[in-house]
Image (cartoon, grey):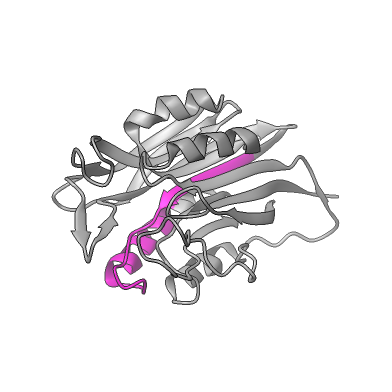
Amino acid sequence: MVLFFGCMASLSNLKLISLNFERSRHLERNIPFLRKERPDILCGQEVFEGDIERISSDLDMPFRVWLRDTLIGEGKNVPGKGGYSGIVLFSRYPLSRVGYEYYHVPESGITEEKTAETCYETNANGIVWASIEVDGREYAFVNTHFTWSVADCPNDAQRVSFVALRNLLEKLGPNILSGDLNAPRGRGMWEEFVSFYGQDNIPKEITTTIDQELHRKKGLQLVVDGIFAQAPYAVNDIRVVPGMSDHQAIVASVSYQEIE
């Protein structure tokens, strides 16, 4: 963790939203909400490749970087639709230092999604990243959909994935990471992210990021979606918004902390 000493002055605030879209199930909810919120950066997980152009156009966010992680069979999970699903980063600002990389891919490659105990899991896991420049300062964003655990507790696959992910993040330098971590707060793996970034930005009063009405399992109280940041970036004013998909949307303000 990098330490900064002295007085800190905050520069332009950017609005960041992270949302697991649950493929195409809720676009009629998602699009009006995102139009109203007008994020500067939108990090989406479980986004159908075929929906990217519509989302980009409807939200006037023309700049983007995408990575497929799961193959969805036609009519499976989303009636009448099939194809690749993945993670995507949308921006209102031109992107630089754009990239993507997997930190976990099965030996069989990206094949049709697997199921276990009625739960869907990503077939591969990676990150997309990009930087934008605002007021002469660079903001570096990373989006991920982390390896899944059927028991909501750390497993060997998650532990191996985290080491590989951490190695990628270290190469990128200071950044703002958001996404669906599939790692509930308080059960071990979430705390690995906190240790790497130095702070848990999700307020303690937020007890779940699972949507209580739209998720297939009712009553789950799990914080699994997060936003983390390393200096010189700071994340504030975090709120969760229900009614978007099986996960709540996370809305946050990102700032650059200048040393005076």
Does residue 29 show up magenta in the picture? no
Which quadrant of the figure has residue 218?
A: bottom left
Is 12 left or right of 26, judged from the image as shown?
right
What residue is shown at x 70% (from left), y 32% (from top)?
134
Where 136 sits versus 242, above or below?
above
Where 136 sits versus 258, above or below?
above
What residue is shown at x 23% (from left), y 42% (from top)?
72
Q: Residue furthest front?
A: 213
Q: Position of residue 233 (x, y in %)?
A: 67, 51
Q: Position of residue 42 (x, y in %)?
A: 54, 39
Q: Is residue 211 visible?
A: yes
Is 73 left or right of 27, judged from the image as shown?
left
Q: Nearer the viewer, residue 114 or 36?
A: 36
Q: Position of residue 166 (x, y in %)?
A: 44, 59
Chain part drawn in magenta: 139-168
- Quadrant of the snapshot with the N terminus: bottom right
Where 54 sits versus 217, above or below?
above
Q: Position of residue 15 (x, y in %)?
A: 66, 42
Q: Residue furthest bottom?
A: 187
Does residue 151 show up magenta in the picture? yes
Which quadrant of the figure has residue 96?
A: top right
